[in-house]
Amino acid sequence: MSETPPGHDALDVIDPDEWNATADRSARERAERRRARDARRTPRPKRERAPRSHGRLADTRWGRVLVIAVGVLALGTVVGLLALWPSAPHHDRSQAFGGKTLGATVVAVADVRCPGPAAQRCRRLSVRLDDGPNRGRRTTLDLGPSNLVSRFSTGDHVRVQPVVAPPGSHGAAQFQFAGLDRRGTLLWLVLAFAVLVIVLTRWRGVLALLGFAASLLLVVRFLIPAILAGSPPLLVAVVGALAVMFITVGLTYGVSPQSAAAILGISGSLLFAGVAGTIAVHTAKLDGRSSDLAIYLQQSNSHLSLQGIVLAGLMLGALGVLADMAVTQASAVMALRRANPALSARALFSGAFAVGRDHLVATTHTLVLVYVGATLPLLLVLQSTGVSTTDALNAQDLAEPVVATLVGAMALLLSVPLTTALAAALVAHVPPDALADAGGGHHH
């Protein structure tokens, strides 16, 4: 066995394959102890401290501003609902629309000579009652001149109303025609709509349907009774629209930074619509007396403000498109911020506004067509009677939807830069990881 050269350890010169056979046990132990000492003396690399993550929007200063602003708005809405919530109505049931109706089935249709000297034909229906204590009984219904009433076929389902005959009268009709029974068709359409929404959008569609139902319930249980109880229609409409907005945005788009920013944008646009609508309605002197229903409403509730009802309808009509547009813009800002955290507020606004500009044109067009469709029968009457365009626009029946369309369109136009600027200013100061919960944005 060769000797170890001076200055070298046996571990460094002995071949590993011959170690177990030739190495001295003591040399091996010394080498192992030295390696252990060197390992203890070598400093371990320091672990870098991970940057603090803002997992929630409320952990940031600008995020707290957004949350507080939305919270104050929500609190004000709740206070308004409690203050304006109507008590139980105490009024007699009116017979303005004939009262309660019963179901019936048409068993025969005939055109008979109308009573009176005029030689014309009137339509008469033979029906079988399907509801009420007289179920199964047959009766006849005289509708009027055949060329002025609807067409009917055997098997059609209709609604009839009992007629209270004056004392001493004999041979008077006991029932009168109330209209076709359309409830089955409406029910099937609602079911088809619900199924289509759920199939295409899954759980988010279920939430949207719940928001839709809750919004309708709020309108029926709060807005309409509060106006009938004498509360200011515009104030009721503002509170009701804000409540509907919270329900719709919350259930449809969830609780997220973009929905919070959209809520503030919608609120600002609704405020503008209320102010602009008030000025326009008062300047054009639209008093709401433009239909037989409005006249009846005024006669049965003399304390109602028909002009306020016009403003309330204007606010509710603009709410739907405002919610869609505002959420879209807030989502666009959030998406740009998550895609490129280095973008400034100005760059976020520019990019998102470019997206909203195209959407804005289409949505404004949609709003105009909605009002045109609602007034189509009136437009046909005006055209067929040769009324000039200026005279037609001057008529209150047409001036009301025109004002509503223009004010709603202006509020819609304002909502795009307002919501985009608001979302960009807030999001630019919020770390991207605080926006991680905003993944369920609005998509088209």
Image (cartoon, helix red, strand yellow):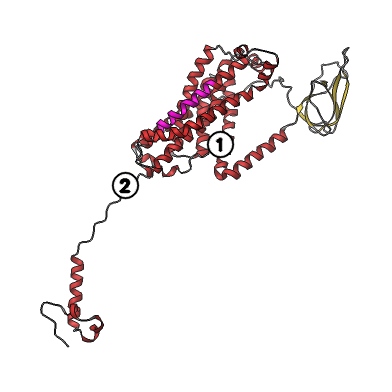
Residue for badge 1: 211
Extreme residue toward the left, this view: 6
Question: How many numbered circles does the render carry?
Answer: 2
* Front one among 365 and 408: 365
Q: Residue 371 placed where, x, y %? A: 60, 24
Q: Residue 30 placed where, x, y %? A: 17, 77
What kind of residue is marked 2? Arg
Q: Quadrant of residue 169?
A: top right
The magenta region covers: 406-423
* Front one among 38 and 352: 352
Residue for badge 2: 52
Residue 39 appears anywhere in the view: yes
What kind of residue is marked 1? Gly
Q: Quadrant of the N terminus?
A: bottom left
Crowd band around label 1 with a 10 angstrom C-alpha radius: few (<14), some (14–19), many (20+): many
Q: Quadrant of residue 89?
A: top right
Q: Is 146 left or right of 32, judged from the image as shown?
A: right
Q: Earlier in the sequence, mark 2 or mark 1?
A: 2
Give the residue drawn at x 31%, y 47%.
52
Would you place residue 318 above or below residue 2 in this image? Answer: above
